[in-house]
Amino acid sequence: MSSRDSKHSSDIKVDNIEKIEDIENVSIPSLDAHYDTTFVRKTIRMVDWRMLPLLGLVYSLALIDRTNLGAARTAGMQEDLRLDIGNRYSIASMIYFFPYILLQIPGNIILRWMGSRTWLTICVTGWGIAQLGMAFVPTWGFLCLCRVFLGAFESGFFPSLVFIITTWYKRYEVQQRLAVFYLSSIAITSFSSILAFAITLLKGKAGLNGWQWIFLIEGLLTIVLGILTWFFIPDFPDKSKFLSEKQRKMILDRVEADRGDSIPDQLTWEKLARHLKDPLLWAFAFMFLASTVPAYAIVFFITIILKGMGYSETQALLLTAPPGIFAAMSCFFFAWLSDRTRSRAGWLVVQNLICITGLALAAYSTSNPVRYFGLFLVDAGATGCIPGVLAYSSNNITSHTKRAVQTATIIAAGGVGGIMATTVFRQQDFPRYVNGLWATIGLQLFMMVLLGITTFVFKRRNRLRREGKLGPLEGQPSFYHTI
């Protein structure tokens, strides 16, 4: 959206901003100085508490519902549905991602048209019903069908959450919020295997096996949370109802002054095509793909890898939690550091190196404790990169339409990463999965190359803009790229 489009709303008043000479080295003056700082802090905290805990809780259930096949497999599903035949388990894991990928962009378009409350309630309740149905499937084919519906309903959820969050905050406030939302879900998800173990103790009750109880209880919890979503989910700032008019205007003023896109623009086919032709969009998408492969590999295969180390079923389920807790702490630390230094690419590279180190230890160490420590590093490096890439991409664009298209495309690429994770970690490579670990290392190296390219491009554009040799970046006179 251009700055001219932003001025269509007469009730949005934005202070003049001095030209930022060098976003990398100069401290940016406060963009909301004309508001009382106590009022600003109080309002932002109100938004934080209204938005982040609920979204984190709902997304944690999305992750649990999406990735609990590993726990269910060890709790009797493999024998009941004969998932040990051929690649049935990998197919059941992978098939979820096809509707998840294809419906990302339509989901974000529906979001603006339908509103966040209605759309997200449909998504959450829908995948809860699909999860509940998985408790009663008689064959692995019906399991795959339920996974298709699960992917279809979940496809509209995560990109919608990221889109909504990025419209409420200034650029250098975004990653910490994404990290809080994401790490809260990761922390809860880390205990999902322990929860699954506790649920499996119901084995035999009502004639259901342990894996069926996992899907039944977690599906019912999701449906209940879907109903709560209707009552408490926040909308976009320009449509918000839980803030006063003064608070709403302050939020919009801050966003407008920061990047000039507080008011949504209209999506057209011409804009959609233009956004999809941007090569940087695809660079960010491949970065997100590279980040999600190790993240999905951990959630799908950690219990299986731990069993391959010689641990019992109970021990494998219980040992899945500590790496997730460590990853959550690492994720928030790097998010805080990234927002504090106003730098993205460099800290992403550091986390890529952490992930690579963990993958090497998991692949080649002969000591099970060392291999287990490697899983800590893999989880930490991959988990931190996910909100990092989302923040990096959202910091370098303006307009609601581009944000909607780019966010959906990037997260769709994450779905491709999920497919890759379920296919490169092959059953015949059990228990060490060396080929899958090497494929994941290659993706981390590729992501580091992409980060080098985007850093060069953004620095060059900023320099040319400062020298007056390039027009306004992203259509905003005061906009400079975040490195």
Image: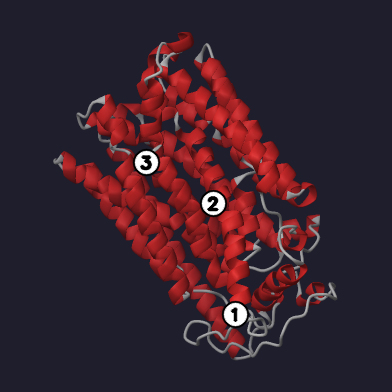
Q: Residues within 10 Å of mark 2 (few under 14, many from 20)?
A: some
Determine the image quadrant of residue 350: bottom left
Q: Residue at x 52, y 58 (%)?
A: 178
Q: Position of residue 250 (x, y in %)?
A: 70, 73
Q: Nearer the viewer, residue 366 or 12?
A: 12
> Can residue 187 be seen here?
yes
Res. 53 mark: 2
Instruction: Give the distance between the C-alpha atoms of the residues marked 3 and 1, in whole angstroms.
Output: 43 Å
In this view, 155 is above or below 262? above
Asked if residue 59 lies left or right of residue 440, the reply is: right
Res. 298 mark: 3
Asked if residue 324 lies left or right of residue 150, the reply is: left
Question: Which numbered disc, 3 or 2, marks the residue that appears first in the sequence?
Answer: 2
Q: Amino acid at mark 3?
A: Ile
Q: Nearer the viewer, residue 446 or 186?
A: 186
Q: Are marks 3 and 2 in contact (CB under 8 Å)?
A: no
Asked if residue 252 lies left or right of residue 73, the reply is: right
Question: Which numbered disc, 2 or 1, marks the residue that appears first in the sequence?
Answer: 1
Q: Residue at x 61, y 51 (%)?
A: 161
Q: Amino acid at mark 2?
A: Pro
In this view, 26 is above or below 80? below
In this view, 60 is above or below 174? above
Find numbered disc 1 in the image and state the secondary structure of the residue it sits on.
helix
